[in-house]
Image: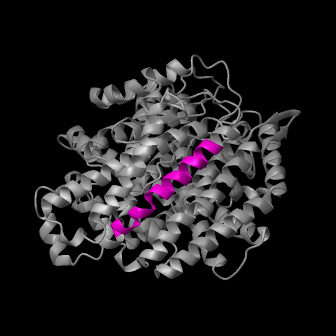
Amino acid sequence: MKKNLPLLDANASAGGASGGFGDLPDWDLSDLYTAPDAPELARDMASLETLCASFAADYEGKLATLDAAAMAECIHRYEAIETTAGRIMSYAGLRYYQNTVDGTRAKFLSDAQDRITAFTTPLVFFSLEFNRIDDATYEAVFADPAVARYKPVFDRMRAMKPYQLSDELEKFLHDQSVVGAAAWNRLFDETTAALTFEVEGETLSLEATTTLMTDHDRPKREAAAHALARVFTDNIKIFSRVHNTLAKEKEIEDRWRKMPTPQTARHLSNDVEPEVVEALRNAVVAAYPRLSHRYYALKAKWLGLETLEIWDRNAPLPTEAPRKILWDEAKDTVLTAYASFSPKMAEIARPFFEKGWIDAGVKPGKAPGAFAHPTVTTVHPYVMLNYLGKPRDVMTLAHELGHGVHQVLAAGQGEMLADTPLTLAETASVFGEMLTFRKLLDGAKTQAERKTLLAGKVEDMINTVVRQIAFYDFECKLHAARAEGELTPEDINALWMSVQAESLGPAFTFMPGYETFWSYIPHFVHSPFYVYAYAFGDGLVNALYAAYADGLPDFQEKYFEMLKAGGSKHHKELLAPFGLDASDPAFWDKGLNMIAGFIDELEAMEA
């Protein structure tokens, strides 16, 4: 049973002190519920308890006896439970992320989690018993048109069969989750939201401080970097405890389930073969010298520096004029780019701006970063941003709206099939960014403007591909080391630095304190090994965009069909209409070559 909590986007631009960006929209959550004490919410919570109890009473011990018609009814009832629980948890989670330091919101979320976990414990039998249905019976029932469309989701469920525990243990893990990972996730969220940083006499949030790392003023960037290092170092024991505990908890569960690697569960949930991920990882690591190492050497030259410090990594170019992009311009830029690809895409995106589906402003206590949360298929997605009028914020808007468009299109699959595996979940978001970038690049009036846009895109792609694969390697090392025993903060710091030096290359020197910068990355806590999905998505989109640019017939129609499919098809089947195959090791070089080509053009401008 999914919990429907938002997942912060690892590639989102940072936020900070808001103001002066135009009329920034706020969420209207009334499409979910009008208030925490709304009678509809109380009704749904009570209904959920009844739905779960009656489902268990009607189906426990009987799944193997159901014919196709009875199985269809069973699935529809299960979807209704997922929809009700998902609606409640979406509302509780979105309210909490609007202000994570509000105790009443935190309590409401925690109480909702507790109650829904208790209600859904009787449903733990469903996947366990389903996986015990013999293969012949399963294949015969799901050959019937009444349930055939649901087969992909149950195929994925049955992939977990070898790692299933006893019914009693599975129920224990389900019950215990609210005081296990969920509690440590909340501790992490509340700790990061409450951090403050002193920079040049100002007290700033994490969002505002990380935003300064992209400031034109180098001393200001340096001051921000040192402020981050000071505060992370002061709190490193808490972050170390969170990571040690969650990694150990995962190791214990994986061991009981006989998972062959710490990454196996993520690959299974992503419906992707380990060798495909390994091919992606190896291709990116092999490309470090011709991507990040080469680009950052070029950037050092532009900045007039012998070596770069970490506060120079996302610095703007000296030729780039500081510019504040108002909200209306950001909105028009993205919608125009979407419409130039297909009017239908802009049409789907427009209600996000008009109906309170975006929360854009930076506010005290608001969660950092950005996300698009699909809620449930009977409502609509919500997008969160921390908008500060920077060019990267426009790209973040394009990215999250891409997710939103994808989620709207996939909703037609229904609650069980709408969720897209993470490897494909980044496709529409990265494609939305690419459309916006290409529109801006086509409109560049001078060589200097083109250079600024190209450099910005290369940095975004390096952050999406190189940085995220380095994150993945860090997590692999962290979980392997934790399996051998407790890790000190210094141990984790050393693992972090081992991947940073390798991925960023010889152009960088690293200030004292940078070794703690692993501590604020939310994905390591909330969703282990998620991060490779960003690199997967970027490589996939680069290959897709190349097919689009080459004039593949009916590309737009094929693209929308892929998004509409949600989680109903495997990546091989989804990519076949485009002549692409992610299981081919050479596939990843197509995307990496696009990044290298942009760097080639930037180098040629220097000649």
Is residue 77 in sight in this rendering?
yes
Is residue 551 in sight in this rendering?
no
Give left or right: position of 576 versus 459.
Answer: left
- Which residue is nearer to you in this view: 71 or 456? 71
Image quarter for residue 582? bottom left
Residue located at (53% from left, 75% from top): 253
Image quarter for residue 404? top left
Give left or right: position of 229 versus 439.
Answer: right
Residue 98 coordinates in the image, percent (x, y): 61, 35
- Which residue is nearer to you in this view: 70 or 189? 70
Residue 322 coordinates in the image, percent (x, y): 66, 26
Image quarter for residue 430? top left
Residue located at (56% from left, 29% from top): 360
Residue located at (46% from left, 48% from top): 4
Residue located at (73% from left, 69% from top): 494
The image's colouring method is one colour
Q: In which quarter of the image is the C terminus?
A: top right
Residue 385 higher or lower than 143, as above or below? above
Give left or right: position of 219 versus 440.
Answer: right
User: Does the magenta portion include 109?
Assistant: yes
Find the magenta span and give its range. 107-127
Residue 388 higher or lower than 194, as above or below? above
User: Does the magenta portion include 418?
Assistant: no
**Total numbered labels placed on residues in the image:** 0
Q: Is the magenta stretch mostly helix, strand or loop?
A: helix
Residue 44 higher or lower than 363, as above or below? below
Q: Quadrant of the N terminus?
A: bottom left
Residue 547 coordinates in the image, percent (x, y): 27, 47
Residue 604 coordinates in the image, percent (x, y): 51, 44
- Which residue is nearer to you in this view: 205 or 14? 205
Residue 386 higher or lower than 264, as above or below? above
